[in-house]
Amino acid sequence: MSDRRTFLKTLSAGALGAAGLACDARGATTRAAGTLDRIGVQLYTVRQAMGDDFEGTLRRVAAIGYAEVEFAGYFGRPPAAVRAVLDDVGLRAPSAHVSYEVLGDDWGPILETANVVGHDYLICPGLPRSVTESIAGYQRVADVFNRAGERAREAGISFGYHNHAAEFALLEGQVPYDVLIAESDSQHVLLQMDLFWIIRGGRDPLEYFSRYPGRFPSVHVKDMDGLPNGAMVDVGQGSIDFAAIFAERESAGIRHFFVEHDRPAEQFESIRVSYEYLEGLRF
């Protein structure tokens, strides 16, 4: 998580995007019962290639078959230029990650950027250690999230939070992730579930879908080579039962499925293998 936060903080705030609820046909995720449509990829997976060849990388992503991407920074490109490339290569970017640090005074420009690029969601991908050392810290985070989410909603954007494993470890006798959910307003704060990290944290995603129906508009699709503490592998090469998880997509509220691998051995091969698995998945 520290690598992700460092990566995000090095990018221009003006080049960070957002995302929000889209309940119309653009948000449809099923082409037929038991299959996925509009499979997406979190571009952090191909961050090295993005830095070397921004437009070329997006073209390669589209050529594999992906319909959607989730940004983790724009590599210095202005929002209008990013939107132009997306339109040219035939991709949508319904979501983007932005750091916790921009949720204050920098929030307005971020929301403006999101609308230019065409994002629907803005997702905070992790928290600084300074606010995660106590339950009171998580309660303060929820307050920040509520205020950021309310401002985002006014701008036509939905705000959400992406989990890691640490939020599921007991802290002062409580589960921090549960505290965040309980203290945040469901109208202003949605949840992006990272399937790898919740399982790595010893929790069951299906339990959370049942407890908080409709609260999870997107998921990060990562696989694990052994349960419960295996390494990250390409989707379909591990042990996570994606068919069982995706069968509950309607009750969970899932509209977007973003493939991700934090440290792939070969970036494009990784996203190709993962896409082909999901394209053929039936549930």
Image: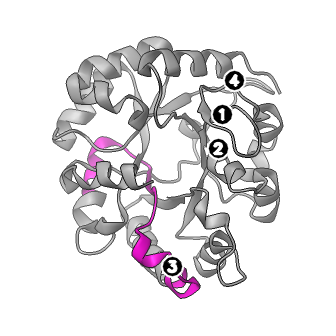
SS category of the residue bearing label 3: loop
Which numbered disc flags the more N-terminal residue, 4 or 1? 1
Q: Where is residue 107 shown, x and y percent of the image? A: 28, 67
Check whether the beta carbons of the residues at disc 4 and disc 1 lie within 8 A of each other.
Answer: yes
Q: Residue 236 carries which label?
A: 4
Q: Separation of disc 3 and disc 2 at Cα?
A: 23 Å
Q: Name the residue under label 3.
A: 133
Instruction: Find out whether residue 123 is within the magenta segment.
Output: yes
Q: Callout 2: 10 Å neighbours few (<14), some, many (20+)?
A: many
Disc 1 residue type (three-letter): Asp
Q: Quadrant of the C terminus?
A: top right
Q: Which of marks 3 and 2 is nearer the N terminus?
A: 3
**Residue 139 seen in the figure:** yes
Observer-nearest of 139 and 188: 139
The amino acid type found where label 2 is placed reads Phe
Q: Mark 3 near mark 1, Cβ–Cβ under 8 Å?
A: no
Mark 4: give few (<14), some (14-19) or many (20+) Cα within 10 Å.
Answer: many
Give the residue displayed 57% in from the left and 57% down from the top: 163
Task: Tell me, yes or no, whether the highlighted magenta stretch contains residue 135.
Answer: yes
Disc 4 to disc 3, C-alpha distance? 35 Å
Q: What element carries label 4?
A: loop
Extent of the magenta region: 112-139
Q: Can residue 253 be seen in this view?
A: no
Q: Write down the residue under mark 1.
A: 223
Amino acid tagged 4: Gly
- Dot 2: what SS? helix
